[in-house]
């Protein structure tokens, strides 16, 4: 259940076995099978009946894992890669700009590893629908099986189809189209066909090179799309920590404030400022402030996101 939550693990569920943020694995729960990692063995039959979020100790008691409920965000971190995939910064940005929400109908080309498809399904459920196309037969079959195992078949229809050779086969039904193809500009005409004409249609094309963006923007313009805009999502990490509040005397005298006090310095400072005895609890306690600073340059170019809208057709009187 990727679009709904339930409390207890059952036979046939896909769960996320969590050791650390860097070590998570998807497990399809089946009695009789065993999950092994460096902490030992974990019987699937011991997982069945436990509440999601439970901690399970290994058979030899050398360690434990957490059994997490699957979500599209976790799936993106554990999905077996058959292709390059979309990650959460791009997924959330695209979902927002395509105005995805429950009830929307969306078209995705191609499906790839199904990373984005899972998030789309959760966002448009329970009444929306995703049509996703993939021309690589094995990838299409693998994604179909995963959607079935994850109870997403009522929300996602996957078709093995070459959308450049055969179009989408859909007219006037989609609120949004997403193209993650090597030549998205060749699919703009089909996208226009598929988008609804009675409301604003939205499109996003995901391309790694600027030359592809230029070709796509030209095709969008030729086909009557407007508000053509391009974005790039780059991740920038910030380190957030508490440091002792700078001494007022130091600040007044313009002395250099040392935010990098070692643990030992901080303890010394605290002891020096503490009264010998008595006094109010807070007296002499170092005031602390929360500081945040970027710890790296922006990283993670994945692709450029080209968005455009198709304005509704207005009937002339
Ligand atoms: N967005 C996907 C995800 O998050 O997992 C990854 C998509 S992957 C980068 C691009 C996919 O498009 C590939 O699996 C490829 O086989 C498929 N593809 C390329 N050309 C296609 C075409 N003409 N028709 C349908 N699928 C196509």
Image (cartoon, helix red, strand yellow):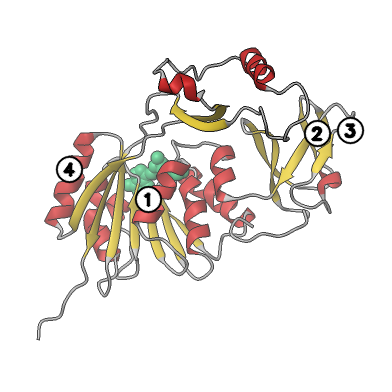
Quadrant (top left/top right/bottom left/bottom right) for the C terminus: bottom left
Residue denoted by label 2: 64
Tell me, yes or no, if residue 164 can be seen here.
yes
- CB within 8 Å, label 1 to label 2: no
Mark 4 or mark 2: name the one nearer the start of the chain. Answer: 2
Residue drawn at x 85%, y 26% as measured from the top left? 62
Q: Residues within 10 Å of mark 1 (few under 14, many from 20)?
A: many
Position of residue 70 in the picture relative to residue 110 (left or right): right
- CB within 8 Å, label 3 to label 4: no
Measured along the vertical axis of the image, is residue 39 above or below residue 207?
Answer: above
Tell me, yes or no, if residue 110 can be seen here.
no
Mark 4 or mark 1: name the one nearer the start of the chain. Answer: 1
Q: Residues within 10 Å of mark 4 (few under 14, many from 20)?
A: some
Residue 94, numbered circle: 1
Q: Point out residue 234 in the picture as x, y percentages from the top left corner.
A: 37, 35
* Distance from Cα at disc 4 to Cα at disc 2: 52 Å
* Distance from Cα at disc 1 to Cα at disc 3: 44 Å
Depth check: 104 or 238 in front?
238
Mark 2 or mark 3: name the one nearer the start of the chain. Answer: 3
Position of residue 45 in the picture relative to residue 166 (left or right): right
- CB within 8 Å, label 2 to label 3: no
Q: Of circles 1 and 3, which is in front?
A: 1
Position of residue 316 in the picture relative to residue 145 (left or right): left
* Distance from Cα at disc 3 to Cα at disc 4: 58 Å
The local secondary structure at tag 4 comes to helix
Residue denoted by label 3: 59
Residue 215, numbered circle: 4
């Amino acid at each position: 259940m990727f679009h709904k939550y339930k409390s207890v693990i059952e036979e046939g569920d896909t769960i996320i076995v969590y050791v650390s943020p860097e070590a998570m694995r998807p497990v399809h729960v089946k009695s009789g099978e065993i999950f092994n990692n460096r902490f030992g063995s974990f019987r699937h039959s011991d997982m069945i009946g436990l509440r999601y979020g439970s901690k399970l100790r290994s058979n030899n008691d050398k360690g434990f894992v957490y059994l997490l409920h699957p979500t599209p965000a976790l799936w993106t971190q554990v999905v077996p890669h058959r292709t390059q995939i979309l990650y959460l910064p791009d997924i959330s940005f695209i979902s927002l700009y395509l105005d995805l929400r429950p009830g929307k109908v969306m078209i995705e080309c191609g499906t790839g590893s199904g990373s984005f498809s899972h998030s789309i399904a959760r966002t448009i459920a329970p009444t929306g629908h995703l049509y996703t196309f993939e021309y690589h037969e094995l990838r299409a079959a693998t994604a179909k099986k995963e959607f079935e195992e994850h109870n997403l078949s009522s929300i996602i229809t996957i078709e093995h189809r070459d959308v450049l050779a055969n179009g989408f086969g859909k007219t006037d039904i989609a609120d949004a189209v997403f193209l993650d193809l090597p030549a998205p500009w060749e699919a703009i005409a089909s996208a226009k066909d598929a988008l609804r004409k009675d409301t604003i249609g939205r499109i996003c094309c995901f391309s790694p090179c600027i030359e592809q963006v230029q070709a796509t923007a030209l095709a969008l313009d030729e086909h009557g799309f407007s508000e053509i805009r391009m974005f790039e999502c780059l991740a920038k990490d910030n380190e957030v920590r508490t440091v002792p509040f700078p001494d007022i005397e130091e600040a007044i005298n313009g002395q250099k404030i040392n935010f990098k006090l070692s643990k030992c310095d901080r303890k010394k400072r605290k002891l020096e400022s503490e009264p010998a005895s008595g006094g109010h609890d807070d007296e002499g306690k170092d005031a602390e402030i929360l500081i945040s600073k970027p710890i790296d340059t922006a990283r993670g170019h994945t692709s450029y996101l080209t968005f455009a809208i198709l304005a509704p057709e207005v009937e002339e009187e």
